[in-house]
Structures are given as C-alpha cells and as structure tokens.
Image (tube, grey):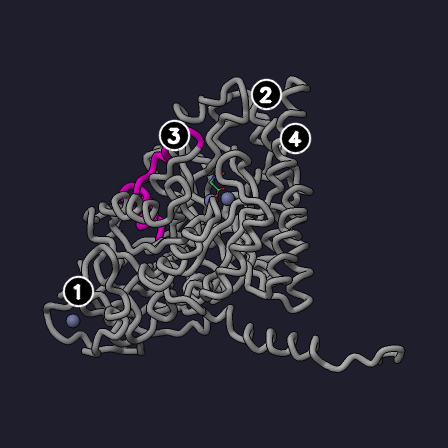
Amino acid sequence: HPSHEFCAAGGGDSGGGCGGGGDGARILIKGGTVVNAHRAEEADVYIEDGVVVAVRPNIPVGDDNVRVIDATGKYVMPGGIDPHTHLAMEFMGTVTIDDFFSGHAAALAGGTTMHIDFVIPVNGNLTAGLESYKQKAANAAMDYGFHMAITKWNDEVAREMEVMVKEHGINSFKFFMAYKGSLMVTDDLLLQGLQKCKSLGALAMVHAENGDAVAEGQQRMIDLGITGPEGHALSRPPILEGEATARAIRLAKFINTPLYVVHVMSIDAMEEIAKAKREGQRVIGEPVVSGLVLDDSWLLDPDFTIASKYVMSPPIREVGHGKALQAALSSGILQLVGTDHCTFNSTQKVFGSDDFRKIPNGVNGLEERMHIIWDSMVESGKISITDYVRVTSTECAKIFNIYPRKGAILEGSDADIIILNPERSFVMGAHAHHSRSNTNVYEGRKGKGMVEVTISRGRVVWEDGILNIAPGSGRYVRMQPFGYVFDGIEKSDAAYRASLRAPVQRGKAVA
Ligand code: URP
Ligand code: ZN
Ligand code: ZN
Ligand code: ZN
C-alpha cells in the first residue's frame, strides 16, 4: 500500500505514531455514494492501516481478512471536524463536564472524528497552558488539534506564540473581546496579537462582543431586578456583537491579516462579515449549531433547569437570527459550522440561580452537530450534500491547513469516515446522548438522517448504536502555519507599500 506521507506529518506531542490504533485493520466500504466537497460519486472505499488506500467503483474483495461494509443507499462522507469545543475547560469557577474521553465518545457517536479545542493559558502563560491541555487530552479517543487563547500581553507571550507555532503545531490564536475581568483583551492587546499572528502565519480568532458594554448591560439588568436567565440575553444584545465584530474586522484590515470570527450568533455580526467579504477582506465566519437552530424563547422558561441550559455567549438570539444565519451559510457568507461545545450539568448551572451573571456559559452540540446540520440544511434543501461535507469537515481542514489528510476521502487521507443513512430518523436527548451532561439543549428534537457507522483512523468505533473506543488512542494533530487564507497577503502588502511611496503630485486632482 502507499507510503504514509500524511502520517509522517502527523506525529505529535502526544498520542501514538503512524497508523495508531488503526494499524492492521483492512476495511472495504461497498456500494455507497462517496461524498467529498468537490464531488459525489458512486464508489467503494478501501482502507488499510488507518489510511484511505483507494476510492473507485467496484473494488474487488481481496481476501478474508478484509472487513466488508455494505453502504448501498447510504452516503459515505469524511468524518466531521468541529472547529470549536471546550473539553475539560476551567471556566466561570467550575470545569466543563465533558473531558477528552466523554467528549470524544459523544463526538464519535454523532459522526465527528476530529475537533480543535482551545488551550487556555495558565495565568497568561502559554507553555503552562499547553502542558495542562496535554494532560487533559491524555485520555483522548479520537484525533484533536489545539487553538490557543491569548489573555495577556508581554514580550514573553510574543516569544511563546512563536514557539507554539514552530514547535507545537498550533496555527491559530483566539482573542476574547468579552469576559471582562477574566479572559477579555483590550484593543491594544488585540492589535499586538494580530500583528504577531500575521508574522507567524497564524490565524487570529475573535470572540466578538464588547465586554465593557456587556458589564454595563449586566448591571443595568440587575438594577432593574432582572436576575433570571432572560437577563443574560437582554444584557448583551446583538448590537454589542455587531460592534465588536466590526471593530475586529477593521483592526484586522488595518494590520492586513486574515480574521476568523467564532460563534457568529446574530444578523448584526453576520452583516459585518458579509460587508467585509464584499470588499475583498479575508474574514471567516463560524456559526454554531445552537445559533442556527435555537431561539431565545427558551430563556424565559419558568423552570430554571431548562432556561439556564440555553445560557451561552454570545446569547442565542430572538427568532429570525437563526434563519438568517442559515441563509448566510448556504450562500457562503459563513463558511463552516462549529458547536462551541461547552457543557455544564444542571448542578453547575445552578450557581447562577439568583444571578444570571453566575450561570456558567455554554451549551452542548458535539454529538448533535452532524445530524442537525444534515436535517436542517440538507434535508430541507438549503444546501447540497457536497456543501454539507464542506461546511462540516473540508472547510475546517483547509482553513487550519490539514487538508487533504483530513476533510476528504482521497487516496492517502486519514480514514476518518462516516456512513449516513438518509432514510432513518433520530430523536435527541439526555437519555440517549454520550455526553456526561444531564441535560441537552436539543432535548426531544427529531429529524431525518442517521450516522450508522463512524470510522476513526481506520477503526470502526460506532456501529449499530454501540461505541467501541479506547482512552488514549486519540492522536494530536499538528497544524502548520500559513494556510491558504494567507495566500496573497504578502503581495497585497507590497502593493499597499508601493501605493504609499508613489510620487504624490500636490495640487493636482487624482483620477
Ligand atoms: O458560552 C460560551 N460560549 N462558552 C464557551 C466560551 C466561549 O466564549 O467560547
Ligand atoms: Zn502501514
Ligand atoms: Zn467565545
Ligand atoms: Zn467557545
């Protein structure tokens, strides 16, 4: 079989080497429709040693040691890649309930085979943050990568950013413009960070809400006696998301570096992204499942356990925003779908029972994303099956520079594959999910399309409703800097410098 050129690039700080848990397994998926972002075709897929070896019609069954899976009438697609999760994250005085094992169980049962989590520095220190997340990920059961948050600024942070990119396979940094008093950064820090990201070829990401105004809005609600979960959404309206999105976009334009806006929750933020894109700026918008399909009416539920599970930031918006975000996703204004999976039990949400400001922020979605996007976008006719693969997998792999090892079913790609039966239906809820959370924001949600089989690096890990996973089998995926979003940045910088140096003819009108 072909050499493992992708494996060689994949050796990581932790996890196994080439082949990993998949070594030795040989699988032939027969009779399905193979869907990649560039095309769908009737073809078989042959897998060996955790890698896709062949994709073409009528591959003969070689010998008895090959496991044959019949995919007739089903879609064979790249496993989902979730660009936005928070497993085992220390946040708002507690820790998210899903760690790298339960989170991976949930992901794999839902057809997601890789995710990128956010390393949070320890007291601003990146190296300590990475060490801590390596430990957290020791029980990983599928492949994962890291983004890193920047919460402080000094020369050491700038040096450490370089080390993260050059030695540790991190190619993106997130700046929180909200969470005043904890994670929030100033415009000054954001500017320094954007400049550093640009020089390293790392993608700058922003949580875009005006944190100062949010703090003001929260006090306003408390003064009005609004202390319940509905106060959360009222205290941080869409205009604050729109303002911060616009500000981040303009600062990124000033620096001339690509920008990735995480969890786009409102029309206000989406319109800023659309406008920047129309003007040719490199801005990537990531909607999350909750923002696409839920609305803020849940926050008014008289049962605190129910209302509080919908508290996340930016907030889930009023009816209308979700549909607009779906339309933006189908038209390419928004490019890929994440979850912001950040789960807390009802026993943790209750910390804010008399003050919404203390409700740990976050919702589930890692297990539900692939099914909800299929049902709400493909089944409804809003996007094609190839676009489904693009927004759930391929685009993420391209942006974070791991394509086509991930995000495709091509010769040489990692065998991260799902088989979806479009005729079966699903019902979601805490009774059936694999997350450790005792609640689910999609409780009772029904839809069409079922991921029947998940293959993670050549191992069948989900089949007939049974998970077969091993803690520690997940592998760290290094991501190289200067992905495609940086193409042309140098040239446009040169053009800009040339325009400044061009002789200025005073007193003459410029055409
Ligand atoms: O409410 C949220 N989104 N919690 C996770 C942290 C973040 O802002 O992404
Ligand atoms: Zn091999
Ligand atoms: Zn955020
Ligand atoms: Zn997040």
Q: In this figure, which residue is indicated by the disc labeled 3?
A: 94
- Give the labeled residue for mark 1: 67
Q: Which sits in the foreground, 146 or 437?
A: 146
Using the image as rendered, state which of residue 201 and residue 141 is in the foreground.
201
> Residue 152: x, y in percent?
47, 45
The residue that mark 4 highlights is 217
Tell me the amino acid under the disc marked 4.
Gly
Residue type for callout 3: Thr
**Label 3 to label 4, Cα distance in Å?**
24 Å
Say above or below: 415 vs 265.
below
First to last magenta residue range = 92-111
Q: Amino acid at mark 1?
A: Arg
Q: CA distance from mark 3 to mark 1?
A: 44 Å
First in sequence, mark 2 or 1: give its number.
1
Q: Which mark is residue 161?
A: none
- Check whether the beta carbons of the residues at disc 4 and disc 2 lie within 8 A of each other: no
Q: Which residue is mark 2?
A: 227
